[in-house]
Amino acid sequence: MNLDNIRIVLVNTTHPGNIGGVARAMKNMGLSRLYLVAPEKFPDEQAVWRAASAGDLLDSAVITATVEEAIGDCQFVVGTSARERRIPWPLLDPRQCAARIGALAGREQVAILFGREDRGLTNEELQLCNLHLNIPTSDAYSSLNLAMAVQIVCYELRMLLVQGDLPASEDDQWDTPFATLANLERFYLHLEQALTDIEFLDPTAPRQLMARLRRLYGRVRLDEMELNILRGILTETQKWVERGRHGS
Ligand code: SAH
């Protein structure tokens, strides 16, 4: 596992102090790649103050306008959440999640998403993810401070390295790279269009169909060749429908 292949992505953070706290939590545990999606106030002296000796992580932070820009090149994405969402997703605690990431982050780019202080990640953002991470808490109060949540997740990654019993790599024997998020997003758009063309999907009553398909493909983890095969099938299906419409 290479911690440099793991990025921490903060979505729409409100308080710059939290960004500084996250930088410190990361640097203490040996992570260095911080991505900020549309932060409300950054750069800011409160961030610098809370970062203490981790100011270098703030200086090298990558700022993007959208989540997709921050994680488009990633092959594995984890979304953190303090509560259960409408459609259940594969859900791990930080230790289980670190073990899973440890089996990938030798070669692959991994992102861990953290949400807004007041309302976390949106359902759409959580549906970009392969799996969800929940930090077990008391039922009385399940929402941790953002930087403390990052600290716990990074600590478990550190412990994997410290203990030295890294899980067997999932991707070493694989012949084709796993699909990036950007390519998967293009595939989902194509799939949605093709399912609409064949009238399997009714855009006026989509009934969470795309969310369920995202969950399915996210669980399987397509490689780039499998993705191209599926896109080829969609294109031919669309041609077939088009020919049928013109009565030939
Ligand atoms: N009220 C929000 C909580 C936001 S806390 C909600 O209900 O979703 C800000 C961020 O810290 C969350 O988006 C998540 O990234 C992280 N976080 C806080 N508590 C967490 C927990 N128990 N498990 C996992 N992530 C948590």
Image (cartoon, rainbow, N blue to C red):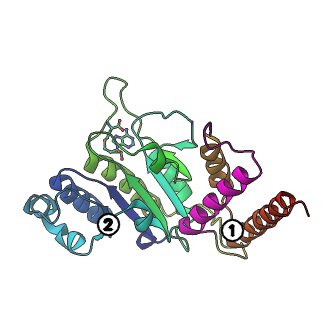
Q: Nearer the viewer, residue 218 or 136?
A: 218
Q: Which residue is situated farthest in the top direction here?
A: 140
Q: Residue at x 56, y 56 (%)?
A: 100
> Horizontally, is 70 left or right of 227 in the view?
left
The range drawn in magenta is: 179-206
105 relative to 189, above or below:
below
Q: Which residue is mark 1?
A: 223
Q: Amino acid at mark 2?
A: Leu
Dividing the image into four quarters, tell me where ligand 1 lies: top left
Q: Secondary structure at mark 1?
A: loop
In the rendered structure, are the residues bearing label 2 and label 1 in contact, judged by CB atoms less than 8 Å apart?
no
Q: Quadrant of residue 107?
A: bottom right
Q: For disc 1, does the CB lie below 8 Å from ligand 1?
A: no
**Which residue in the structure is indicated by mark 2?**
34
Which residue sits at x=54%, y=65%? Answer: 181
* Residue 174: % across, % down: 71, 72
Q: Amino acid at mark 1?
A: Asp
Mark nearer the N terminus (2 vs 1): 2
Q: Is residue 37 magenta?
A: no
Label 2 to label 1, Cα distance in Å?
A: 26 Å
Quadrant in the rendering for residue 26: bottom left
Q: Main secondary structure of the magenta part?
A: helix
Does residue 86 sit above or below 14 in this rendering?
above
Asked whether 104 or 160 is in front, the reply is 104
Mark 2: secondary structure:
strand
Q: Residue furthest right?
A: 248
Provide residue 226's location: percent of width, then percent of height: 74, 67
> What x and y, as percent, mark residue 29?
32, 62
